[in-house]
Structures are given as structure tokens and as C-alpha cells.
Image (tube, helix red, strand yellow):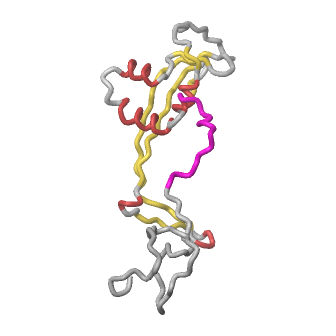
Amino acid sequence: MHGGQHHHDDAHSHHRDHDHGHDHHHHGHQHAGPGHNRQRGTVQWQVPHRPESKDPSPPRERDLDLVEASFVENFTRASDPTSFLRLAGIPFVGVDAFGKALHLLRVETAERTDVGAVVPLLGGGGVRYDVLPARMTSRRHDLSFLYHDGQAVVRLTFAEARSLRDGTDASHFDITPTE
């Protein structure tokens, strides 16, 4: 607009993005930004399209790391650990892929906090120890399920224990003597 008057002689609606068949009369200045018959840069604002295929993992295995973290956080506080294990889908008697029965003996949880780091010195002549600042410390939770397979104790992860076929009703097993 110049002096209160629009610089076009034609009476037409003036949209931001438009293209019309006449020249603009430029009076020694540039019009700023997109519009006025200029190519506008590409803008992507929507979420990119995802493939039509769904998550290939079975629903029981999705977000297993989050499920395991929640299990560790709450198992030790559960008033009824046996029911908690049932809710988590951990069999008391599990059958592995080879048909071997495993009997749950113990659930172990442990917490670790890393507060220091050891770094080897160049040339291999020693190591350097540093105390980690608070933002670099890390906490880890370990979770193990100890099963007996008739001969020895077997330590399983959360995912491995959940993958066992539940054979809890079949709780009798024979112990084979080892020589």
C-alpha cells in the first residue's frame, strides 16, 4: 500500500498466495516474504507418514523394557509377591523351547548406582579415576529369575522368564542323579 491506496489498478481480492496474469508495479522496493507471485519455501508441519505395517512384535513383548522397569520398581513392595508374579506373566513352572521344565525358586532384584569412572591412560601405563558429576551418574536395576531345571539353578531375564510356556499345574519332577 502506498499513501493509503493499494498499488494495483485492478479491483480484485488480494489473497496471500495468488497468481494473476499481470505485472506488479514495483516502485523501487521489494515486497517482503512469500506471496506476490514468489515461490514459497517448503514447510512440513504434519507427522510424516508411517508405513502401513504394524509393530511386528507380539503385544506381549511391546515396551518390555518399561514393563520390566515397573516390575522392578514395585515387586519388592508388593504385599503378595506370588500374585504379583502371576499378574506379570511369570510362570512358577515354566517349560522352555526344548520341553524342559523349570521351577521358579527366587526373584532377585538389585540396584546399582555408578558414581565414578575409570579411563585408561594413553600408552596403557595406567588408568585415571574420576568422580562423576551428579548429571552423569546412572542408576541401574538388575532383575533375575532363578529357576531349577532338575539338575542346576538357571538364571533367566525378565523376557526369558515370560517366554516360558506356563506349566505351573505340572509341579512334579524327578531328579536325575548326576555322576
Q: Is residue 80 left or right of residue 35?
A: left
Q: Going 47% across and 91% down the picture, which residue do you hit?
A: 27
Q: Say above or below: 9 vs 59.
A: below
Residue 40 percent across, percent down from the top left: 54, 71
Snapshot quadrant of residue 55 = top right
Give the image location of residue 66, x and y in percent: 45, 38
| Residue at x-position 55% and y-position 75% | 38
Front-lying residue, 41 or 64: 41
Residue displayed at 60% across by 15% down:
101
For image coordinates 65% across by 12% down, the residue present is 176
Compared with residue 40, is residue 28 higher up or lower down, i.e. above or below? below
Tell me residue 165's x, y (percent).
59, 18
Specify the quadrant that holds the N terminus: bottom left
Foreground: 128 or 87?
87
Prevailing secondary structure of the magenta residues? loop
Q: Is 133 placed above or below 55 here?
A: below
Residue 54 drawn in magenta: yes
Which span is picked out in magenta?
A: 46-60
